Image (cartoon, helix red, strand yellow):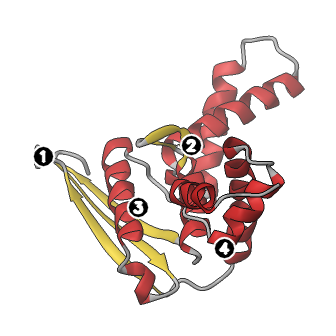
Amino acid sequence: MAISMDDVKKLREMTGAGVLDCKKALQEAEGDFEKAVEILRKKGAATALKKAARATNEGLIFSYVHFTGQIGVLLELNCETDFVARTDEFKELGNNLAMQVAAMAPRYVAIEDVPEEVIEKEKEIYREQLKDSKKPENVIEKIIEGKLKKFFEEVCLLEQNYIMDDSKKVKDVITEAIAKIGENIRVSRFVRLQIGEE
């Protein structure tokens, strides 16, 4: 099937993918834009996974202070090169993530950052809540697993729904940025201050 350059250009504007990738995706999707976007997203996610192991020694520190002056955030976002750190896409992502931290108050970056004793304490609380439920042990374990997942979605930045588009998780938005920008990107740490909070 012949694909016009206008279609390739349109898909490129929609996804930020390379010209050749857009052309191949449109050919594979037989001109169907939605299908082509899906193909590119899958390819981008696969590429992003490969890039995730690469060192991120560059980046920027982003700050956000809420208009009330009561909440402030400093967030370190890393990438592989200084060149990418200066791009508008990287800066926009960093600013949005700092706002995310201000709005959603996560306590940790990722699940692996949650201390084991915190996880055990949560499980203990859930077990206590369920002790009079008369449910079998395997059902209780499944309920605890579900509650723990919900807990991680609240306290871990990467597991939270993205405030700019709640159909995505923060980790998905970062994966999409890695695919689009072509470098590994990661949030290494953040600090959130709120008046009156310890």
Distance, label 2 to label 1, CA atoms, is 26 Å
Residue 133 locus on image (x, y percent): 74, 12
- The residue drawn where x is 47% and y is 40% is 165
Q: Is residue 90 above or below residue 42?
A: below
Secondary structure under badge 2? Answer: strand
User: Can residue 114 be spotted in the picture?
Assistant: no
Q: Which of marks 1 and 3 is in front?
A: 3
The residue identified by callout 2 is 168
Any mark on residue 52, and which? Answer: 4
Secondary structure under badge 3? Answer: helix
Left or right of residue 23: residue 55: left
- The residue drawn where x is 73% and y is 43% is 32
The residue identified by callout 1 is 67
Q: Which of marks 1 and 3 is nearer the N terminus?
A: 1
Q: What residue type is labelled 2?
A: Lys
Structural crowding at the residue carrying mark 2, measured as other residues with C-alpha within 10 Å and reported as few (<14), some (14–19) or many (≥20)? some
- The residue drawn where x is 71% and y is 63% is 23
Q: Nearer the viewer, mark 4 or mark 3?
A: 3
Any mark on residue 93, and which? Answer: 3
Q: Quadrant of residue 122?
A: top right
Q: Which residue is more in the foreground, 165 or 56?
A: 165
